[in-house]
Image (cartoon, rainbow, N blue to C red):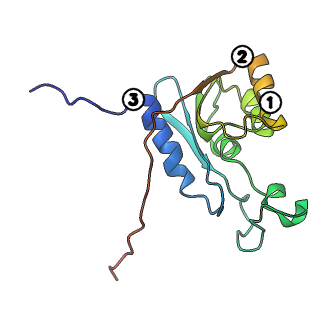
């Protein structure tokens, strides 16, 4: 019997894991996920955008409009940084899969952590100064940036647990 065809590529597989991680985000407007993978295709860490440990997501704002202290922007940890901070080991030399191109602040952490490649899906903020700065730093540091379009989309409907 011949082997099964049309399996997921490694990029599709790990971007799917990033999408699955994004489903953990409680952000009502933007869910971003990240997966860090080593050269042997082993998952090192995952992350999603959310508040730091100990910061109750019912006590901090999720708003996008208003002053800094009344919006999420002062408080949310991005998926990429969460994946780096949550890693049980060094991510030096690894590849980062992320559903949204990293901002300039995450780019700094990616470079400092030694991540050598970013595989991303969306670049919807490409025209912003933050992304321009991010790409400039990543390029200067020799981080490879690859955009992929053929990814799997996850639409998960949570099924209630009926066992007692």
Q: Secondary structure at mark 2?
A: loop
Position above or below: 56 against 153? below
Neighbourhood count class around disc 1 (C-alpha, 10 Å): few under 14, some 14–19, many 20 upward: some
Distance from Cα at disc 3 to Cα at disc 2: 25 Å
C-alpha gap between disc 2 and disc 1: 15 Å
**Secondary-structure class at tag 3:** loop
Residue 103 higher or lower than 144, as above or below: below
Please provide percent x and percent y for residue 11: 47, 30
Q: Position of residue 152 (x, y in %)?
A: 43, 42
Left or right: residue 153 compared with residue 32 = left
State whether residue 56 is above or below residue 32: below
Say which of 150 and 144 sits in front. Answer: 150
Task: Name the disc covering residue 142, or none.
Answer: 2
**Residue at image location 39% in from the left, 29% down from the top:** 9
Does residue 45 lie above or below 54 as drawn?
A: above
Q: Which mark is residue 9?
A: 3
Q: Quadrant of the N terminus?
A: top left
Task: Give the side of residue 39 with respect to residue 128, left or right.
Answer: left
Q: Which residue is mark 1?
A: 132
Q: Nearer the viewer, mark 2 or mark 1?
A: 1
Q: Do labels 2 and 1 touch, CB within 8 Å?
A: no
């Amino acid at each position: 019997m011949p082997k099964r065809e049309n399996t997921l590529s490694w990029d599709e597989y790990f971007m799917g894991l990033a999408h699955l991680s994004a489903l953990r985000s409680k952000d009502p407007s933007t869910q971003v996920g990240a997966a860090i993978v080593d050269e042997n295709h082993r998952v090192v860490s995952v992350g999603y955008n959310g508040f730091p440990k100990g910061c109750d997501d019912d006590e901090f704002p999720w708003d996008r409009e208003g002053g800094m202290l009344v919006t999420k922007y002062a408080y949310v940890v991005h998926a990429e940084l969460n994946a780096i901070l949550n890693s049980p080991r060094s991510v030096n030399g690894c590849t980062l899969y992320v559903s949204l191109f990293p901002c300039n602040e995450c780019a700094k952490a990616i470079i400092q952590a030694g991540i050598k490649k970013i595989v991303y899906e969306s670049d919807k903020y490409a025209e912003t100064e933050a992304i321009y700065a991010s790409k400039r730093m990543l390029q200067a540091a020799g981080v490879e940036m690859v955009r992929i379009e053929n990814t799997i989309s996850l639409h998960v409907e949570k099924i209630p647990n009926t066992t007692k």
